[in-house]
């Protein structure tokens, strides 16, 4: 496995592989890898000859008061996980390699980006689309792997690939959870023991929402009220949003018919956690 920081070095390896007719899978991450990331890497390994994992805490997807500096990092541990998983290249650039001082070209999207996480993180998805578009240009992967954990991001990336005719297949991967239901996330590292327990309200509320829906309830407000009540009972939790949206358009729905995404962002202490399920 090679760890490369330069775009030109990555391009050189990719060129060599493509000359040999080998396929390339890309797993974009911000590092501090866990079993959720590993599931993406394993799938990429199954479906491609070569696997590139990018580890880059992308500054332009963080808002001014967000956790860019505090975001957990551990390249040594990440390298071990990647090496054991058979990764071929870790691409770990500096911010200065990815963004020229006078960088001024962004990938923006008119719809899909304003609801859910876009409400409290207005420039977040512009940063995500820009960096993913750049990674696609650098690695030119046959397939790229994204987790449903970030369901809105997944819908946005699929739309970007379609709209910009990017020659990469987006592969969606299921959410990996702890045994008790908490979705794995690098940000779980911020949680105290007490907060870790409180964080279970997210998956509990989603499970309850599913139960109510499966009991025949089609009214989104009724399902949402059931979920919100569960979260509001937890003193350490504060709702950012709990919503039911169309899975493709990310627009709110009133009646649940067709494929919907039930998504939430909840602060547990100071840590903002997201989770979702699809009906
Ligand atoms: P991140 O490093 O948090 O930006 O995540 C990198 C990729 O891993 C994204 O496509 C995420 O959706 C995915 N991912 C993160 N956590 C999980 C999880 N618990 N299960 C599945 N995929 C995940």
Image (spheres, rainbow, N blue to C red):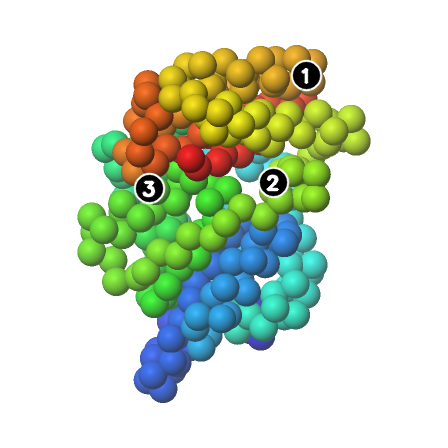
> Viewed as shown, does residue 252 lie left or right of 13?
left
Foreground of the two, 227 or 89: 227
- Neighbour tally class for label 2: few under 14, some 14-19, many 20 plus, Cα within 10 Å: many
Q: Mark 3 points at which residue?
A: 156
Split into 4 quadrants, where in the image is the C terminus? Answer: top left
Q: Are marks 3 and 1 in contact (CB under 8 Å)?
A: no
Mark closer to the observer (3, 1): 1
Real-space Cα separation, disc 3 to disc 2, in angstroms: 21 Å
Residue beneath the point at 25% across and 58% down: 166
Q: Mark 1 points at which residue?
A: 234
Give the image location of residue 163, x and y in percent: 20, 48
Residue beneath the point at 39% across and 45% down: 154
Q: Name the residue under label 2.
A: 183
**Pointer 1 or 2: first along the chain:** 2
Foreground of the two, 271 or 55: 271
Res 127 seen here: no
């Amino acid at each position: 496995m090679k760890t490369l920081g330069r775009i030109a070095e990555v391009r050189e390896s990719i060129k060599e592989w493509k000359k040999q007719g080998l396929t390339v899978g890309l797993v974009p991450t911000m590092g501090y890898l866990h079993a959720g990331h590993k599931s993406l890497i394993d799938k990429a390994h199954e479906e491609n000859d070569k696997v590139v994992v990018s580890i880059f805490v992308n500054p332009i997807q963080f808002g001014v008061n967000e956790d860019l500096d505090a975001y957990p990092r551990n390249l040594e541990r990440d390298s071990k996980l990647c090496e054991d998983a058979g990764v071929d290249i870790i691409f770990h650039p500096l911010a200065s390699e990815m963004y020229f001082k006078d960088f001024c070209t962004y990938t923006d999207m008119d719809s899909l980006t304003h609801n859910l996480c876009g409400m409290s993180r207005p420039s977040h998805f512009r940063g995500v689309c820009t960096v993913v578009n750049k990674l696609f240009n650098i690695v030119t992967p046959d397939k790229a792997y994204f987790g449903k954990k970030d369901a809105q991001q997944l819908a946005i990336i699929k739309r970007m690939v379609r709209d910009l005719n990017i020659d990469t297949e987006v592969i969606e991967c299921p959410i990996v959870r702890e045994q008790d239901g908490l979705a794995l996330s690098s940000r779980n590292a911020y949680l105290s023991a007490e907060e870790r327990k409180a964080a279970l309200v997210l998956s509990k509320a989603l499970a309850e929402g599913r139960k109510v829906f499966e009991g025949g309830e089609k009214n989104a407000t009724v399902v949402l009220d059931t979920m919100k009540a569960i979260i509001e009972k937890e003193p350490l939790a504060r709702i950012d949003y709990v919503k039911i949206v169309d899975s493709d358009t990310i627009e709110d729905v009133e009646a649940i018919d067709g494929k919907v995404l039930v998504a939430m962002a909840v602060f547990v202490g100071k840590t903002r956690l997201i989770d979702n399920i699809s009906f």
